[in-house]
Amino acid sequence: MTATHMSSTAATWTYKYLPDAKLAGNDLRGSLVEHTVLDGADLSEADLRPTGRRRTSWRAVRLARAILRNVNANDSIWIFCDLQRASAQGARLENAVFRGVNLAWIDMRGARLSLTRFVGCAGIHGDFSRADLIGADLSGALVFGGVLMDRTHSHLPVSVFDEARFIGANLKRACFRDAQLSGTNFDDAEMSGIELNGANLSGATLRRASLRGARLNRIDPPAEFANAYGAPGALFLNADLREADFSGADLRGVRFWNCDLRGARLDGGALSSADVRAPILL
């Protein structure tokens, strides 16, 4: 293995095998190539933008506060990594796998995460505004304002997914409690058993989404807030809402068009304040 130092601020590495490297705080822009092995490396606070690292192996890599803006890491594998407070705006992470990764307070605004899988990740909490999560798999994930599998930290700032796209995503039994989901696209998503208690769904679209047994208690905001900011209520179109729980939810401005509401739990008169068209109730 060899390396060529190009300047005082950046290096061009001609090899691909860098296990356990100690590169915390280094400027590594443009320094890593495809297929690089970085297992066990310490890249905390390192600047890794925007070089291509497609199909790179990231196992037990420390990347806390690292700069990953606009990186190309499609098809990459991230296992037991620490990405807390990392900056990954606009990152290309399509078809990637995140397993057991700490994503607390990560910034993924505008990231491309189509077909990406999140398995057993800690603290899926941060800003995913305008991120593309088409076909992503977050089944069973907790993404509300706390740490995954630790419901005692729900006082932390909420997760933000405003205008994100979850088209066709697998969100079965995921928890988006108190999440900001304004303008988010859930068309064709599998959302059976999802928890959306306290979530802001103003302007969200859920066309043909499956939400059987979903919990949507206290979905926010009420109509007067949405109208004040020009945002309509959520749109459920041809959605499967059988056995969904809307108890305690303020449904003013919410649109239920051609939805299956058989067995859904609704407070008395709740639907009278919503825009309901051609529902299936029996």
Image (cartoon, rainbow, N blue to C red):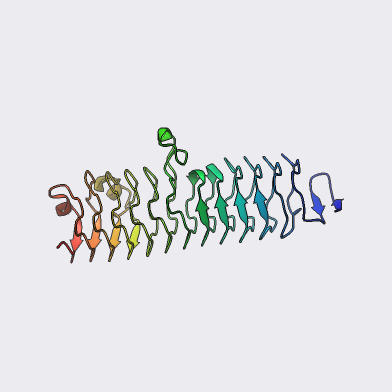
**Residue shown at the point (28%, 50%) measured from the top left:** 227
Quarter of the image where one finds residue 271: bottom left
Looking at the picture, tell me which residue is in the foreground, 215 or 277. 215
Q: In the image, residue 80 lies at what x, y percent?
A: 60, 45
Position of residue 10 in the picture relative to residue 72 (left or right): right
Specify the quadrant that holds the C terminus: bottom left
Q: In the image, residue 122 lies at what x, y percent?
A: 51, 42
Quarter of the image where one finds residue 34: bottom right
Q: In the image, residue 274 lies at what x, y percent?
A: 20, 55
Position of residue 175 in the picture relative to residue 110 (left or right): left
Position of residue 232 in the picture relative to residue 150 (left or right): left
**Residue shown at the point (19%, 56%) measured from the top left:** 263
Position of residue 265 in the picture relative to residue 198 (left or right): left
Number of marks present in the image shown: 0
Looking at the picture, tell me which residue is in the foreground, 19 or 261. 19
Q: In the image, residue 73 lies at what x, y percent?
A: 63, 57
Above-or-below relation of 55 to 8: below
